[in-house]
Image (spheres, helix red, strand yellow):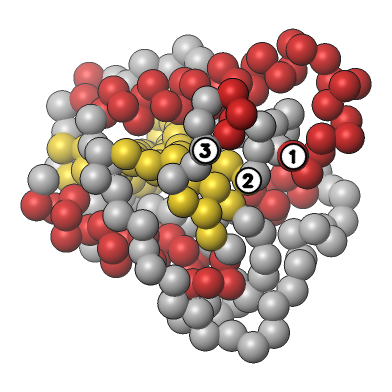
Amino acid sequence: MQTVVALYSKTDAIVQPWVRAGFHAVLVDLQHPDGEHTDGDVTRIGADMLDWVPPLWLARTSVRMVFAFPPCDHLAVSGARWFAGKGLGKLAHSIRLFDRAVFRCEWFGTPYMIENPVSTISSYWRKPDHTFHPWQYTAYEASDNYTKKTCLWTGNGFVMPKPKADCEDIDDRIHKAAPSPERANFRSATPLGFSRAVFAANHKLAMAA
């Protein structure tokens, strides 16, 4: 069974193209119900990434790609004005979550992509390998015509897709998102166009590995 893994991932946007192509997808996130729940070609695992150990059945499958979206609540520079009031504990926790993403991506030994907005990780670790805005991939999904500078740390042969834009009006809906319980999930959702572009650029390499 060929598998792709998405860590800190509540939604399946990044894995949708892979599932349609016949891959099995594993999503790990605290927001999923506890335990493992499989629905068709998608397994959702509710777990804290700091404690989670990949089960034997997953370690024995042919994992082809790993994606990680560690929380950026206390790292994103967009919230820099509140850094002093958050305290060192929250900062340290966010860095631990990011570090766990790096550890697991390297542990699987496959091409990987770790996503975060513009953040202080660039100072604590290293600068990102790539950056993009959703509108740069509107040829794959017209509704992604918005700005949101996103950083990627990649490795093990991950191929960054070339921009392919097809839009006239670009908005800043992420910046203007109204406060709500789902605001964080809305702001962090992976653009469908970029997800499709990543698949197009990487699936042949992944299948040949």
In x, y percent, where is residue 166? 52, 85
Q: Amino acid at mark 1?
A: Val
Where disc 2 sits, the SS reads strand
Q: Earlier in the sequence, mark 2 or mark 1?
A: 1
Disc number for residue 77: 1
Say which residue appears at 48% left-offset and 46% top-offset.
152
Which residue lies at the image location 43% right of the left edge and 60% below the top edge?
195
- Classify residue 121 as left or right of residue 6: right
Element under disc 1:
helix
Proximity of marks 2 and 1: CB atoms separated by less than 8 Å: yes
What is the distance, in whole Å, between disc 2 and disc 1 at their CAs? 8 Å
Q: Mark 3: which amino acid? A: Lys
Residue at which label 3 appears: 127
Viewed as shown, does residue 34 lie left or right of 84?
left
Mark 2, Cα crowd under 10 Å, few <14 / some 14-19 / many 20+, is: many
Q: What secondary structure is marked by label 3?
A: loop
- The local crowd at label 1, few if under 14, some if 14 to 19, many if 20 or more residues have their Cα within 10 Å, is some
The CA distance from mark 3 to mark 1 is: 14 Å
Where is residue 130? Give x, y as percent. 46, 51
Q: Amino acid at mark 2?
A: Pro
Q: Nearer the viewer, residue 7 or 42?
A: 7
Count the labels in the image.
3
Tell me, yes or no, if residue 122 can be seen here. Answer: yes
